[in-house]
Image: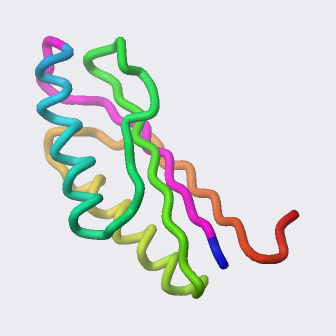
Amino acid sequence: MYVGTLSFDLLLGDVRSLKEKRSVVRPIVAELQRKYAVSVAETGEQDLYRRAHIGLAAVSGDAGQLSGLLDRCERLVAARPEVELLSVRRRFHGEDDE
């Protein structure tokens, strides 16, 4: 079994309130869940309206399949015009990890 995680640090574009922030972040989270069946949530910076952290996790029996899935998720977020992807942290845990 393999577990992969992504942590996205995002800068939001023309957002002036927490309500506007939710209208940008929620569709990204929902699309990742719907399209790739991964666990995803806003995980940080909830009090700042121009920044967002999104965490994502997925499990697979095949390391190559999981790596490809994480790549597709990262490309989806990076392609969103309303956000700037500041950084992505990827973690990969395999059967040999303790």
Q: Is residue 67 above or below residue 23?
A: below
Q: Toward the viewer: 28 or 85?
A: 28
Residue at image location 52% in from the left, 76% down from the top:
67
Residue 84 position, x and y percent, is 28, 39
Residue at image location 20% in from the left, 57% down from the top:
31
Q: Is residue 27 above or below residue 76?
A: above
Residue 95 in the figure: left or right of residue 75: right
The range drawn in magenta is 3-17
Q: Identify the image quadrant of the N terminus.
A: bottom right
> Is residue 13 in the magenta section?
yes
Residue 3 position, x and y percent, is 61, 67
Q: Main secondary structure of the magenta part?
A: strand
Residue 25 position, x and y percent, is 23, 37
Residue at image location 87% in from the left, 63% down from the top:
98
**How many discs mark residues in the rendered view?**
0
Q: Is residue 80 above or below residue 49?
A: below
Residue 23 in the figure: left or right of residue 94: left
Please identify the quarter of the rendering in which residue 69 is found: bottom left
Q: Is residue 18 above or below residue 72?
A: above
> Is residue 43 in the magenta section?
no
